Image (cartoon, rainbow, N blue to C red):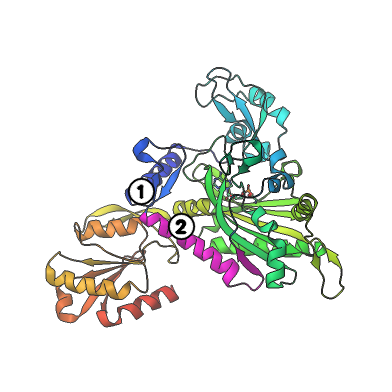
Amino acid sequence: MLMKNKKDDQLMEKIVSLCKRRGLIFPGSEIYGGLANTWDYGPVGVELKNNVRAAWWKYFVQERDDIVGLDAAILMHPRTWEASGHVAGFSDPLVDCKKCKKRHRGDKLLEEKLGVDDVAGIKLEDVQPRLMKEKIKCPDCGAVDWTEARKFNLMFKTHQGVTEDSGSLVYLRPETAQGIFVNFKNVLDTTHKKLPFGVAQIGKAFRNEITPGNFTFRTREFEQMEIEYFVKEEDWKKKYDELKKASMDFFTGLGLDPKKLRWRKHAPDELSHYSKETNDIEYRFPWGWGELEGFAYRTDFDLAQHEKFSGAKLRYRDPQTGEEFIPHCIEPSFGLDRTVLTFLVDAYAEEEAKSATGEMETRVVLKLHKDLAPVKVAILPLSKKNELVKVSMKIYDELKPHWMVQHDETQSIGKRYRRQDEIGTPFCVTVDFESLKDKAVTVRDRDTMKQERVKIESLVSYIKEKFEND
Ligand code: GAP
């Protein structure tokens, strides 16, 4: 287990503060004092999130022949959640501190001290004795005095329509997966896909988490990027391994440090009710290893349950043999917000570098993959003088149709470079007085800080080439 230290705490504080300062992520409902553990993506953050979403969709849907997309409703028929097992079993062990009455997730308290391997799959009745044996203190008051653990269902309930009786009860979906299972027949009938094939979906999910925290790592409202991949039972292992590799390649292909990524296999008593095998991709966050993607073999559990509860036939007919059967399912399940956070943490760097005036200073830079960078190019006129701004605005207008670009003319050039480094902008284009004569600009590379003089007329092709080749 990786223990948290002061430096790690400071790193997270720096990242949270950078996110606020530069318009990546703001605390939710801030003017009302905030709503705990809710976060809003700002103008820069929404670009980063959209880029992660688009990269995932391109990689898993656009560039593959065997996966199609879907966008199902958040509110689903309540029977869905009875069939899926969430009404009966989607819960965490809740314990109360007898002294201060604050509530906590018992298994997470144990995990923080003992590590995930020691605690995974712990039985409900063992949580409180273990908390007492390990002398785990209440994070709020320091007492070691816990109630028995009891099940707390994580689904948010609400009511549909004008009445609030039990007949109008609906849930906010706790996973996007069920929207795919209930549409299995619709997708099959309209696409005529042959096994194996998958259905991908990106969308909001909601869980009334007992202990949210670590910035956007665990929140009550979040987005998932999920694939339900349908196979013949005998093919599950082969496809499982193939998709496992594709998942890891997705992260490393976008620049995540492979040394900070690992697979962790779930112990048999830790498996979700639907899973026969689960492996998580974990990332080494500043506070320790944490799940980034869940990767489960869900068998035919979900489709079989929905057949039983809905009466609809959710079968596949083998075109060769004519045999009808319920396909088995492999599920790569990613958290979008968690993936964004991981890219932010992984890209954050502090370096000693020369300032515009030649002194050494610490520069903060987000070394994001170019596909993920929220702003691709910043255009910076050296001064606010009309003749320069006229040229820089013309360049800005030319670049806009190609990339998300920014025109920034406020403060010193050094401060503007620093601002762009902090949001990970790969290229800064400086327009100076020489530009008026030589019709050229200086292009500064975020990572090497090298500067090159480039003719304005060939700027678009120069940057295009850089993006394609780097
Ligand atoms: N359909 C399977 C499923 O939902 P999960 O392991 O519970 O599996 C999948 O969740 C992914 O969703 C996680 O790996 C994580 O990235 C993300 N996720 C789950 N709960 C989250 C939360 N409270 N806040 C942010 N992301 C969460």
Q: Position of residue 298 (x, y in %)?
A: 74, 53
Q: Indicate yes or no: mark 2 CB to ligand 1 under 8 Å.
A: no
Q: Position of residue 158 (x, y in %)?
A: 58, 40
Q: Is residue 395 left or right of residue 108?
A: left
Residue at horizontal 68 percent and vertical 71 percent from the top: 190
Which quadrant would the N terminus be assigned to in this image? top right
Q: Quadrant of residue 434?
A: bottom left
Which quadrant would the C terminus be assigned to in this image? bottom left
- The magenta stretch is 43-70
Q: Closer to the camera, 382 or 46?
A: 46
Q: Check residue 69 for magenta coloring.
A: yes
Q: In what element is the residue under mark 2? A: helix
Dot 2 or dot 1: first in sequence order is 1
Q: Position of residue 88 (x, y in %)?
A: 72, 38
Q: Closer to the camera, 311 or 337?
A: 311
| Magenta-colored segment: predominant secondary structure | helix
Mark 1 = which residue?
A: 18
Mark 2 = which residue?
A: 49
